[in-house]
């Protein structure tokens, strides 16, 4: 079983749509979770951390369900500039050893 | 500007040649990382270093070597033993206080 699995995509949505990405992780010891965004041929950039209580940043909402080992990202009112690959990430941290495990990513294209 | 720089942006390797990829950060981060990204794949960890003069193998270290003589610098050498080096190489860093990793712009390595 892959350590971090994401929806394979691609997702093609019109501007203004709401889109949800799902992710599962296999390591129950994972402590922290993130969503990164990666534009074509660019480096990944942190979009948001994911907290157990759920967190929101503008049009973006992230949720974590530790019991189901499930993470989600919701994007409301999609913009053309949201087109990118979204990477689900889990840490395997223990002590001072921070290692990230990345999903393969889900490609989102927002169409005019 | 604070950040992570990688050079060169593109690098071409001939058969049997060793090449070195540069990674520099002025964020005063303790930990640095090297990842490899292949098309349609998630990022895979090559090597990481939590402090100066210390580093550990990641998941795919064979055919690569690193050094960490200075806090700011973490160069990666792709040796001739790496038989499939064509990939997008990403360097990242993080502080000891948080698990979030910040990425440089990457180096694309191509084999001639």
Image (tube, coloured by chain):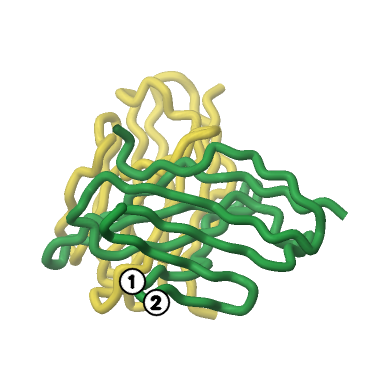
Chain colours: A green, B yellow
Q: Chain of mark 2?
A: B
Q: Quadrant of the C terminus of chain A?
A: bottom right
Q: Chain of mark 1?
A: A
Comparing B110 with A84, the one in front is A84
Image quarter of residue A58: bottom right
Classify B4 as above or below A43: below
Q: Residue at x 33, y 56 (%)?
A: A90
**Residue B40 image offset from top left, x and y in percent:** 53, 33
Q: Residue furthest front?
A: A67
Question: Which structural element holds mark 2?
Answer: loop
Q: Is residue B41 visible?
A: yes
The residue pinned by badge 2 equals B27
The residue pinned by badge 1 equals A52
Q: Residue at x 41, y 37 (%)?
A: B19
Kindly report which numbered mark, 2 or 1, lies closer to the viewer in this rendering.
1
**Residue A41 image offset from top left, x and y in percent:** 63, 46
Comparing B108 with A80, the one in front is A80
């Amino acid at each position: 079983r892959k350590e971090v699995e994401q929806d394979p995509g691609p997702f093609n949505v019109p501007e203004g749509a709401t889109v949800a990405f799902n992710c599962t992780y296999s390591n129950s010891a994972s402590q922290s979770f993130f969503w990164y965004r990666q534009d074509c041929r660019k480096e990944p950039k942190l979009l948001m951390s994911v907290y157990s209580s759920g967190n929101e940043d503008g049009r973006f909402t992230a949720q974590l369900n530790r019991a189901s080992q499930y993470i989600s990202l919701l994007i409301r009112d999609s913009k053309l500039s949201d087109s990118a690959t979204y990477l689900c990430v889990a840490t395997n941290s223990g002590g001072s050893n921070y290692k990230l495990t990345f999903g393969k990513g889900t490609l989102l294209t927002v169409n005019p | 500007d604070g950040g992570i720089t990688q050079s060169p942006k593109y690098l071409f390797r001939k058969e049997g040649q060793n090449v070195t990829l540069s990674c520099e950060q002025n964020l005063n981060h303790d930990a640095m990382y090297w990842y490899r990204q292949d098309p349609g794949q998630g990022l895979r960890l090559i090597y990481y270093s939590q402090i100066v003069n210390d580093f550990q193998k990641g998941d795919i270290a064979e055919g690569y070597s690193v050094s960490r003589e200075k806090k700011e610098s973490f160069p990666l050498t792709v040796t001739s033993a790496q038989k499939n080096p064509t990939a997008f190489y990403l360097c990242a860093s993080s502080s000891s206080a948080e698990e979030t990793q910040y990425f440089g712009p990457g180096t694309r390595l191509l084999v001639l």
